[in-house]
Image (cartoon, rainbow, N blue to C red):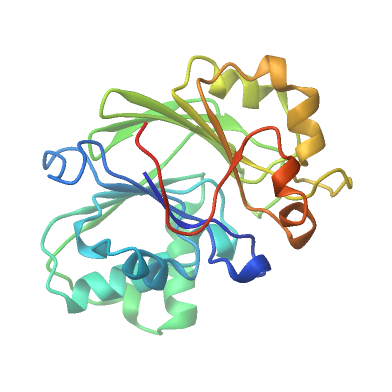
Amino acid sequence: MTFAGSGDAFGSGGRLQACIHLQPNGPAGPPAHQGPVLLDCGATSLPALRQCGLDPDRIAAVFVSHLHGDHFGGLPFLILDAQFAGRTAPLAVAGPPGTGPRLTEAMECLFPGSSRVRRRFTVEVTELDPQGAATAAGVRAQAFPASHPSGAPALILRLTLGGRIIAYTGDTAWTPAIAEAAAGADLLIAEAYYWDKAVPHHLRHADLAAHRTELAARHTVLTHMSADMLGHRDQACHQTAHDGLVLRV
């Protein structure tokens, strides 16, 4: 796992936006039916991936937590880059209800006509029920409802790939669904936007500390940190991510 982008929407600490690269079977590469995949694809994802030496054209699927630009705004660039690179393998995109039309709108807004161009590969969009599960590119994704208004339901995600379970809060206020998604997971990736200041629709470190006994994942890593939280990261009760952090789960 590579945190190609670990930042918030505003580049706090010079960090790039949410883009977490999961590669099931290590450097030798995963089988064709499973991975590598992305958890979220913020607007800065292409430079984030390239700075980490990760090939965007090999990504099999993108799992989107919610439809804010710092979490899904990189998809038009990823798709167009794949088109110019001559990609032929399908690209799966799995996200909340409304992902399909929002992606089309984003592509037309940024690059008019781009959503209608014929490509050598297909973009296969799966819209996840906030209390359901689906499989995309060989990865099982279970979704839970998050508390984060974004014009469509926001999701907490639980992915099963490469024999591991990865839970991801995306952006959300505290909800018991976080503990449900994290139960028995090998890794929980959790937002920690602020240290203890209450910010609507976002997780604070104080929330995670208060509910620490409920989070039954083997390991937790904090991401999506504001300047306030970055100033407290040495006091955090969990490992904190940074751009380029590589973990073997």
Q: Quadrant of the N terminus?
A: top left
Residue 148 visible somewhere in the drawing: no
Q: Residue furthest bottom?
A: 112
Q: Residue furthest right?
A: 197
Residue at horizontal 82%, vertical 35%? Answer: 206
Q: Is residue 39 left or right of residue 117?
A: right
Determine the residue positioned at 77% across, 45% down. Answer: 201
Q: How many marks?
A: 0
Residue 237 vs residue 145, the one in the foreground: 237
Horizontal side, residue 76 vs residue 162: left or right: right
Task: Give the answer, above or below, for where 218 lies relative to 13.
Answer: above
Q: Is residue 137 above or below residue 91?
A: above
Instruction: Please tell me which residue lies in front, 103 or 180.
Output: 180
Quadrant location of residue 186? top left
Query: Viewed as shown, does residue 94 lie left or right of 65?
Result: left
Locate residue 53 relative to residue 193 in the image: left or right. left
Q: Can residue 57 be seen by looking at this rendering?
A: yes
Placement of 81 over or under 138, stated as above or below = below
- x and y percent of residue 27 in the render? 18, 46
Q: Place residue 49 in its image quadrant.
A: bottom left
The residue shown at (12%, 73%) is 86
Residue at image location 27% in from the left, 75% down from the top = 81
Spot the residue most to the front: 234
Query: Residue 44: x, y in percent?
Result: 48, 70
**Quadrant that contains the C terminus:** top left
**Closer to us: 165 or 28:** 28
Above or below: residue 182 compared with residue 100: above
Residue 38 percent coordinates (x, y): 37, 50
